[in-house]
Amino acid sequence: IWFDHSNVVLCVQKTRLPEAMINSIIIMRTNKSRMAAFIGIGVLRHMLYRLIFWAAILLCLSQLLITLWRSDRPMAMKSSNINTRMILQNMIDFHSARTTTPPYESLLTVEPWVDKLSVQSEQLIMDQVQKRLPNLPVSYWNQNKNKAMYYKNESCAKFPSIYELEFNNVYWQSLQTSNGSFHLYSAYYDVRKLSRIGPAVRILGMINRIEPTVKTHCQFWFDDHRQPVIVKIMEYKYIWYKKWGNYKQGIFQPYLIACQIPKSHHHAVPASVSLVENVCDKATNNLRVVYNRPAVKKGFAVCVKGLDFLYEDLSVRLVEWIELLHILGADKIFFYQLQVHPNISKVLDHYESVGRVHVTPLTLPGGQPNVPGFQHLYLTKKVNHKRQNELIPYNDCLYRNLYSYEYIALLDIDEVIMPIQTRTWKELMDTVMVKALAARNETRASYNVRNVYFLDDLIHTHGWFKTMPKYMHMLQHVYRSKNYTKPNQYVKCFHNPERALTLHNHFPLACLSQGCTSYAMDTADAHLQHYRADCVKTLKKTCTEFRQNSVIDTTIWRYKRDLISRVSNTLSSLARVLPWIIIKTLTFIHRRLNKSTYAAKRLDPIPRVQSRKFRINVNFISYFQVLEFIYVSYAKRASTRIEVPKQYKWFQNINFYKQIPTSYFCEDLYFFETYNIEFTSLRSHIVHDVGILKVFLTLCQLLIVVLFTTTAKERNPTKDNQFIHIIILRTATILIVYYTHNCVTSYHKIKKFINKCTKFNYNIILKSKENKHYRLIDII
């Protein structure tokens, strides 16, 4: 399609050719007077236009016939990674040879694309297994698998092979006894000074019996020992109160099983332990004994129960929560994951890659469901089962970090222990310890803070605070109930790992030495900010009172500058806010266009509107609408939700969409296929900066293509039309170049760049400085 466009002539070959030919879209800058002199009078020029037009039509038809003919032939392979020139050559060769050889013979030489990666070694596979199953003693088994290891004879307490163990729901190992089934999760070495039984191994698991009476034994396996050390278990510690419900036989209950290490072996740490009913039984379980003891203790660890947010995209709120906890002083956050939304997984993977969180996959033991969706419904309906299962990750987190942190807090992702008089948790505990010791000269097992609700509907009268990002939930919700929940109800604690034996969500259930003493912090020092849509069910009656008596509490705003910066940087790296940067930039340009006046024939630093008539005749905003629509469509594909605030809804006028064929805007993004642009792998690049840039460049390319394709339909384009088309092309190019050379994701930086750009130099992106042809391929 050729058309006269002032100093711009476009040649678009819109056929379904391979990518190499499709990319031959060239925008050339010519001299209008030369063109007129070469072509001659208007009649001849129109005849030449018609001739070129029908030639293009014939070319398209010929290519269409070839495409239809090839569609009837089986394709052996289809991949974006194949050399398109080779495909075209093969197509031509195949077409020319069809008269001399049968069609099926050419298929005999085609080799399908398969994964030819060599088979991994057994050692590499076992390393991957160890990462996936941290409770399995893979290393110890590898060292001793060829040795004869047993108790008295080969038929007594023989060392079990990992291939003979009985697994349950991936992460659990089982023991079937004469009176109950055991599902064991992990084992830990406990040498705390306050422990009355001395060095011991504690095994965390679930048993389908209340007050189990079956006598079991621990088989300890030590390095450099071929015989196990066998002892009777010391106790079954019940991690639950029977008054809470589910106190029935047959329901799996959480237990902490203790096995005392004999004095003869106090100097060594067992490599693994097996639980059996009889001394000489061959074990069906073998757990690696966890003993993590760093040289230096850190301050604070946070443990989060099994995440069950399969249908809720809380990714942005999770980023805000993680960043706030790190500002307050959390050294590391330990997550346990059941089923979560894909965007939450991306957030967790990002933080795990930088070492700020640790994610442990988790399943429910026994016959409980682990199918996504069904598991969520099960935990919703079976509340007591849910709470009993939560005690496993809580106590596993405690014992894995027994010697690594001074304090351990169990928090949900909607809870924050907020210091009032101080800025960090360390400063808070330094203050609280002085007060606690003054009240009673002893070390407490925990230090608790009272709960106060920041309910979702307690918001600003205008809806949101304009000085804060709207997507930052905690910064926006600063109205809370005036009254706290009652003391010792729904509190959260900083637990002392030296004293805690078993933990519950709110308090330690069992402690070492002098019992579970907890110090209640004064609300003037700290409280638990609980961000919920509603109160818990047991507080439904008082929840109305909480709502009616609310106060503003802006304590969190002390951290707003640092918090906003951290969250913005993280979201940018995750490609969660890129569409907003573009939309805000285009909004800025749109406002400058409306407020300015055209004073010169040359392009000004900021594009300006020429006349009132121009704004009426050409809806220049509509080209931005195309870009916004593409971003929204892409976001839907990538499971990214975009909520458009009121001040950005100027581009939602859809009149322009009628000017483009409807097929371009269908849900399956046929628009991209029309121009043969690669758009299949964008979802996998969402968390990479390179992927962000590819998305941006692709969409700007589409913007330019739509721009000139639409202009081609106009018979007599006016100077005003030409002017705004150049403006849009120039604006898109500025954004492309700035992203390419600076890789920025800041709207304010782009705004500053456009303001400073007094004269844009196209030579930055053109191959030749002398030959100033506007080639689309060079611009992209």
Image (cartoon, rainbow, N blue to C red):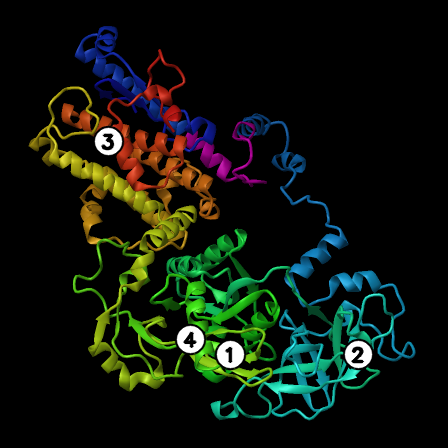
- Reading the image, the residue beneath label 2 is 263
The amino acid sitting under disc 4 is Lys
Alpha carbons under labels 1 and 3: distance apart = 60 Å
Q: Secondary structure at mark 3?
A: helix
Report the span colored magenta.
63-87
Alpha carbons under labels 2 and 1: distance apart = 30 Å
Contact (Cβ within 8 Å) of mark 2 with mark 3: no
Dot label at residue 262:
none
The amino acid sitting under disc 2 is Lys
Alpha carbons under labels 4 and 1: distance apart = 12 Å
Alpha carbons under labels 2 and 3: distance apart = 77 Å
Residue 363 or residue 744, whichever sits in front: 744
| Viewport quadrant of the N terminus | top left
Residue 508 or residue 512, whichever sits in front: 512
Mark whose residue sits in front, 2 or 4? 4
The amino acid sitting under disc 3 is Asn
Precedes in sequence: disc 3 or disc 4: 4
Dot label at residue 444:
1
Precedes in sequence: disc 2 or disc 1: 2
Q: Position of residue 363 (x, y in %)?
A: 57, 71
Please rate how many residues cluster around mark 2, counting C-alpha atoms within 10 Å: few if below 14, some from 14 to 19, many from 20.
few
Alpha carbons under labels 2 and 4: distance apart = 40 Å
Dot label at residue 435:
4
Mark whose residue sits in front, 2 or 3? 2
Q: Position of residue 70 (x, y in %)?
A: 50, 35
Mark whose residue sits in front, 4 or 1? 4
Mark whose residue sits in front, 3 or 4? 4
Precedes in sequence: disc 2 or disc 4: 2
